[in-house]
Every structure is written in structure tokens, then in C-alpha cells.
Amino acid sequence: MSLALLVGDRHSGKTTTCRRLAERMCARGSTAGGIIAPAVHETSGCVGYDVVDLANGRSAHLATIDGPGTEQVGRFHFLPAGLAFGKAALEQAAELTGGLVIVDEVGPLELEGGGWCQQLDQLADRRGLTLLTVRRSLAVEVARRWNAPATSLHDLVDGPDAIIARLIRMLEGGMLSK
């Protein structure tokens, strides 16, 4: 697997960048799969997250500040149905023989063995590019856990357009090999 990390702070545009990258790849006739996790906002601010399957555009509620969940990080409770939905999307994406797979976002839950951890381990056996989004504070730990080379970090301070162009060149230039 060729692994890349999209690094940024909270609300820095990681999910938006991933959505734009997937759209650009699909417009070019390439394969894109995996998940993004857009925030759900109300007048009080962020109240949860959804999970969107990039292969088909379907979504489910992933996490909420209101209510019980099977796993919790900070104030967010992860809903069993949302976790199952995301895991199924990632398992399907692991079967792609090339192209792009996005996992938005990898964090404390995965580093503790929960969330998408098992699916991330499965993605290690696929060809193509797997892009993980991660907060800057966890980038080194995530890179170490999933054996990402230091050159695979793409920080949003470089600008999303530059990062998208760089990743597309990697995908289309045949720079990826197993």
C-alpha cells in the first residue's frame, strides 16, 4: 500500500479537501472509495458527525454529543449503526485494486484499537493510494502505527489545491506500487 496522511488542525478543511480530491478523481474516470466524516452543525456548534461512503454517496449518522454510543472520544458518542456503515464501506474499499481510498478521520479511537482500526489494517494489503486524514497532534503516532513514511505527510498549511494536485500526480503518474 502507498499510504499518505493529510494533516491539519480541527476544522482546517481536511474533509472538504478529501471530498474535492475524490470528485476530481472520479471526474477523471479513476476509482475513489472510502469514507469522509463531515461535521453536523446546529446553532450551538458541532453536535456530531456523519459518515459518507464515497463509492455511492450514501451516509449515516456516526457520532453525536447526545445519547449513548458504543465508543466515546471526548464529548462524542459513536453510534453502532454509523460505525458498522463506515466499516462496511472501508471493507468494500479495501477490495479496490488501485485508485484512491480515503479514511477521514483517523484519531484516538483507532490508535486505541477501536473505530476503523481493523479496516486500516486490512487496507495495508491493497494496491493504490490510501489517504488518511489526521489531526496534526496525532500525525506522528498515526504514521508510526500504520508505517507511513515521513515523505507521505501532506500538511494543509501547503494549501488544499497544491495537495490535491500532488496526490493526483502520484495516482496518475504511476508512482504507486505495492
Image (cartoon, rainbow, N blue to C red):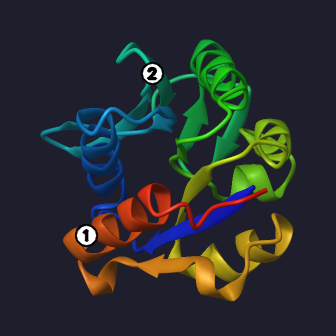
Residue at screen point 73% across, 80% down: 149
Amino acid at dot 1? Pro
Give percent across and percent down for residue 122: 84, 38
Out of 53 and 21, give the one closest to the viewer: 21
- When the figure is inspected, residue 148 is found, relative to residue 140, above or below; the finding is above
Residue at screen point 24% across, 48% down: 20
Q: Is residue 161 left or right of residue 112?
A: left
Out of 90 and 69, give the one closest to the viewer: 90
Residue position marked by numbered label 2 in the rendering? 55
Rate crowding at label 1 as few (under 14), some (14 to 19) or many (20 or more) other CA atoms within 10 Å: many
Give percent across and percent down for residue 36: 43, 39
Rate crowding at label 2 as few (under 14), some (14 to 19) or many (20 or more) other CA atoms within 10 Å: some
Figure quadrant of residue 10? bottom left
Image quadrant where one finds the N terminus: bottom right
Q: Residue furthest left?
A: 43
Out of 47 and 154, give the one closest to the viewer: 154
Amino acid at dot 2? Ala
The secondary structure type at the circle numbered 1 is helix
Residue at screen point 46% across, 78% down: 154
Using the numbered discs, state the Cα–Cα distance from disc 1 to disc 2 in whole angstroms: 22 Å
Out of 5 and 44, give the one closest to the viewer: 5
Give percent across and percent down for residue 99: 53, 42
- When the figure is inspected, residue 27 is found, relative to residue 145, above or below; the finding is above
Q: From this viewpoint, is residue 12 visible?
A: no
Disc with the residue nearer the chain's start (1 vs 2)? 2
Q: Is residue 52 left or right of residue 142?
A: left
Residue position marked by numbered label 1 in the rendering? 160
Q: Which mark is residue 103?
A: none
The secondary structure type at the circle numbered 2 is loop
